[in-house]
Image (cartoon, rainbow, N blue to C red):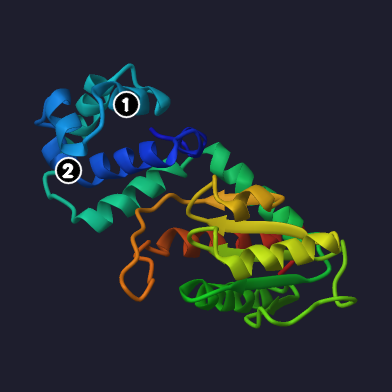
Amino acid sequence: MVTVDQMNQLSDLELDIYNYIISHRHEVIHMKLKDLSTDLHVSSSMITRVAKKLGYEGFLEWKAEMKLDQEDKPVQNKRALNYILDYFNRVDNKEFDDLIHQAAEIIVNSHEVICSGIGLSDAIAKFAASLFNRKGKRTMYSGDFSARFRGMYDQNDCALFFTISGETREVIDRIKELKNYGIKIIVVTNNASSSAAKMSDLALTYYMPSTKNSYFYSSATQVPVLYIIESIANLFIEYGIY
């Protein structure tokens, strides 16, 4: 089973290769390595390297596991569902639980929580703030990225940012500003190598395929993000809240 730590080791190109193979697993299990490398326009050694980073001896072992998995599931899932199921398989481990506990501990021990995002992530931030408040944690939603917080918050608070790319300029600037006040930063993003993730005190990543249309709307599903938010909130009772 692929873990979050293994996913973190993949470069952007390697992540693209992984996402392609997962979304085309029904075709890939019948392909030779040479043919797959031709379709992907990468070398065979690159695909083998991805397989080894994911814990397999090579592409053949990876393909064999996918084939066994396919035999256990006679009904073929749609591509989007494959990504989501793959995500839940990846986070079904202690490593993910530890990250969620770390996030919950930071949030619970903070005097106040600020939730922020832009676009679709703005709606997710509103949901997180509403859920945390309902669970008994004082939380503020902030969608105005022109506002300044001097004197309003300090090192006893934390900020939770939702950003798919992790490269949105307004988000990066806001993180820089809040870090100057000593506020702890948690980032939920699609890419651990993004600027926002690297600047954070804790990054929670989900690795979903993401493309943008002419209106700059990202196609990355937010199902994993909602799961992350609810997983954190469900731990509040363990820390004496709710």
Secondary structure under tag 2 reads: loop
In the rendered image, is residue 45 in sight?
yes
- Within the image, what quadrant is residue 95 found in? top right
Residue 240: x %, y % from top left: 77, 61
Give the left or right position of residue 241, taking residue 194 as reference.
Answer: right
Residue 229: x %, y % from top left: 56, 63
First in sequence: mark 2 vs mark 1: 1
Callout 2: 10 Å neighbours few (<14), some, many (20+)?
Answer: few
Residue beneath label 1, please?
46
Q: Residue furthest right?
A: 151
Can you tell which mark lies on residue 101? none
Give the left or right position of residue 176, taking residue 123 as reference.
Answer: right
Residue beneath label 2, please?
73
Q: Residue at x 9, y 31 (%)?
A: 30
Q: Residue at x 68, y 66 (%)?
A: 173
Callout 1: 10 Å neighbours few (<14), some, many (20+)?
Answer: some
* Mark pair 2, 1: CA separation: 29 Å
Q: Quadrant of the C terminus?
A: bottom right
Above or below, 33 relative to 24 = above
Above or below, 204 relative to 52 = below
Q: Quadrant of the N terminus?
A: top left
- The kind of residue tagged 2 is Lys
Secondary structure under tag 1 reads: helix
Q: Residue at x 62, y 81 (%)?
A: 143
- The kind of residue tagged 1 is Met
Q: Residue at x 22, y 20 (%)?
A: 60
Comparing labels 2 and 1, the label whose residue is closer to the camera = 1
| 189, 134: nearer the viewer | 189
